[in-house]
Image (cartoon, rainbow, N blue to C red):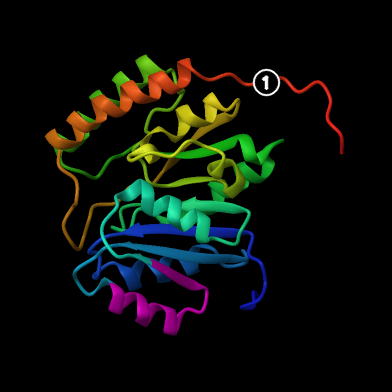
């Protein structure tokens, strides 16, 4: 059994903003899914103005493996993920959206793929929501965005928008960081000479709370992000190491 002082193998990083009604239920599911794994849960409250902080305090009293970090003001999902990864103590990271649509029961399968990797620091396991439980507008806009991104970035990933991903802490911290980078993790791993695999995962309808994402505004921002990532890829090079002192 994991103790408070033990270093966990896995940190589940959950960025949230105004998700008061999803905190306790999702944390319970995470614990049930990871029985037998040495893990911690790191919530990052991205400037919530509802009862999310109070619910996190309740969760930490009930579940000792839960830790939390709070942004004074909202900085966006990518920065929240980065804050959580930096705060984590574990070698491996799993990210989950805080709205309950990702299923924590899928984490062990993705973690198993990462454990098998020859170099986990250059390996990303991405969830693929093969049966989306969103509105038709969200599904069609996401399908178009994924097709455009794959055509321009050749990132070998059918669904970069899925919040469920597993990777190493060191590998993530070696990536360039910018707003909305969480949607381009596959391309950034490939840019670093890494490998990306996609694993089908469950996707659930949102049962509580309100989505924080629009459609038109996200599409407009995505165009700028896409051009920026294309520039990063063109300007990158991966050195081939001939020899190094141990």
The residue that appears at 26% across and 63% down in the rendered structure is 47
184 shown above or below 49: above
- Identify residue for label 1: 239
Q: Residue at x 40, y 64 (%)?
A: 43
Tell me if 62 is positioned left or right of 8 in this view.
left
Which range of residues does the magenta coloring cover?
A: 53-69
Which residue extends farthest bottom? Answer: 61
Q: Quadrant of residue 193?
A: top right
Would residue 30 be found to the left or right of residue 239 on screen?
left
Q: Residues within 10 Å of mark 1 (few under 14, many from 20)?
A: few
Q: Position of residue 194 (x, y in %)?
A: 59, 29
- Give the answer, above or below, for where 81 lies relative to 21: above
In the figure, 45 relative to 57: above or below? above
Quarter of the image containing the C terminus?
top right
Of the 4 image quadrants, the one containing the N terminus is bottom right
Residue 56 drawn at (x, y percent): 35, 75
Is residue 143 at least partly visible in the picture?
A: no
Residue 22 screen position, x and y as percent:
28, 67
Residue at position x 24%, y 45% from top? 133
Is residue 184 one of those drawn in magenta? no
């Amino acid at each position: 059994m994991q103790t408070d002082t033990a270093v966990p193998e896995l940190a589940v990083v959950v960025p949230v903003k105004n998700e008061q009604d999803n905190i306790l239920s999702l944390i319970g599911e995470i614990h049930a899914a990871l029985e037998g794994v040495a893990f911690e849960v790191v919530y990052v409250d991205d400037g919530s103005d509802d009862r999310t902080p109070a619910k996190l305090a309740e969760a930490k009293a009930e579940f000792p493996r839960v830790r939390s970090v709070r942004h004074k003001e909202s900085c966006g999902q990518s920065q929240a993920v980065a804050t959580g990864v930096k705060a984590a103590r574990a070698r491996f990271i799993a990210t989950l959206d805080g709205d309950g649509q990702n299923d924590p029961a899928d984490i062990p399968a993705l973690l198993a793929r990462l454990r098998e990797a020859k170099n986990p620091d250059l390996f990303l396991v991405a969830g693929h929501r093969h049966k989306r439980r969103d509105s038709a507008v969200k599904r069609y806009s996401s399908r178009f965005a994924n097709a455009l991104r794959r055509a321009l970035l050749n990132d070998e990933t059918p669904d970069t928008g899925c919040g469920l991903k597993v990777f190493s802490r060191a590998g993530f911290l070696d990536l360039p960081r910018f707003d909305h980078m969480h949607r381009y993790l596959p391309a950034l791993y490939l840019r670093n000479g890494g490998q990306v695999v996609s694993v089908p995962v469950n996707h659930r309808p949102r049962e509580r709370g309100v989505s924080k994402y629009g459609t038109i505004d996200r599409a407009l921002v995505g165009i700028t992000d896409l051009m920026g990532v294309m520039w990063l890829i063109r300007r990158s090079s991966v050195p081939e190491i001939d020899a190094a002192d141990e």
